[in-house]
Image (spheres, rainbow, N blue to C red):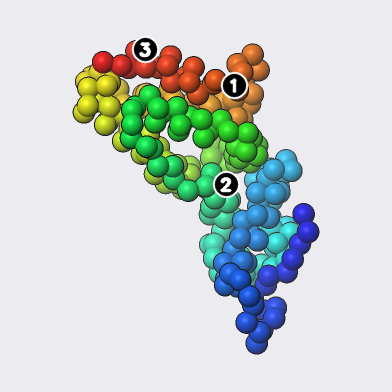
Amino acid sequence: MTTVSVDEDAGRGRKAPGRPRDARAAEAILDAVTDLLGEGLSADAISIEAVATRAGVGKATIYRRWPNKEALLIDAVARMKGPLPVPAGTSVREDLIMLVGLARHPHMEHYGRATACLVPELVRSPEMHAVFQAVTEPRRDVTRQVLLRGIATGELRADLDVELTLLMLAGPSIAQNMLHWNPAVPIEGYAEALVDAILRGAAA
């Protein structure tokens, strides 16, 4: 990756074209974190100094945006997942297939490797775990609302355990993305197969 300096001290007095300097600096910093994680560095091994060097900024530029390394790591991983998906609302099955399919998309392999590097931090630090949950909950709630809508419309059984179903939908994808837990399960048709298996017990 070619490093382009975007430190706020650079080019003072000139108006840079394109995105505001603050936005470009933040993107360069987050890119640096995900690059380092994707290269196999553990969260412990990544330092603010290493991130600053990779991003071409000063450490002070990072600390003006994030109070510590943990907050920076979580923001970087959250950014890798992209914006919240918007289900079409046509049917519970189609919406769930879309959501599961996003988690198993090939571009998520990089995210899976980066997340795997964060697991020791999540296990060891209650603060990191709480921050990670805060990042994960909005995305989890998208799927939750699909399930609740299915209960309301009669597509899903009224006594469905929504939170357990969320776990059943997400857990296999996490295991496959991070660990390639069962290489015998093909990527092709994975989302449809998983959703249909769960709906056999969840459908009304």
Q: Which residue does the image show at 54% across and 62% down from the upper left?
A: 66
Q: Which residue does the image show at 42% across and 16% down from the upper left?
A: 196
- Residue 34's place in the image compared with 123, above or below, is below
At label 3, which amino acid type do we have?
Arg
At label 1, which amino acid type do we have?
Glu
Badge 3 element = helix
Badge 1 element = loop
Q: Is residue 130 visible?
A: no
Q: Which residue is mark 3?
A: 200
Q: Which residue does the image show at 21% across and 28% down from the upper left?
A: 152
Q: Nearer the viewer, residue 100 or 33?
A: 100
Q: Which residue is mark 2?
A: 80
The N terminus - image quarter: bottom right
Q: Residue furthest right?
A: 2
Are discs 3 and 1 less than 8 Å apart at CB? no
Give me the C-alpha separation between circle 3 and circle 1.
Answer: 20 Å
* Residue 168 position in % (x across, y down): 43, 22
The mark found on residue 188 in the picture is 1
Q: Nearer the viewer, residue 182 or 18?
A: 18
| Mark 2 closeness class: few <14, some 14–19, many ≥20 residues within 10 Å | some
Camera-near label (3 vs 1) is 1
At label 2, which amino acid type do we have?
Met
* Residue 99 position in % (x across, y down): 45, 33
Give me the C-alpha separation between circle 3 and circle 2.
Answer: 32 Å
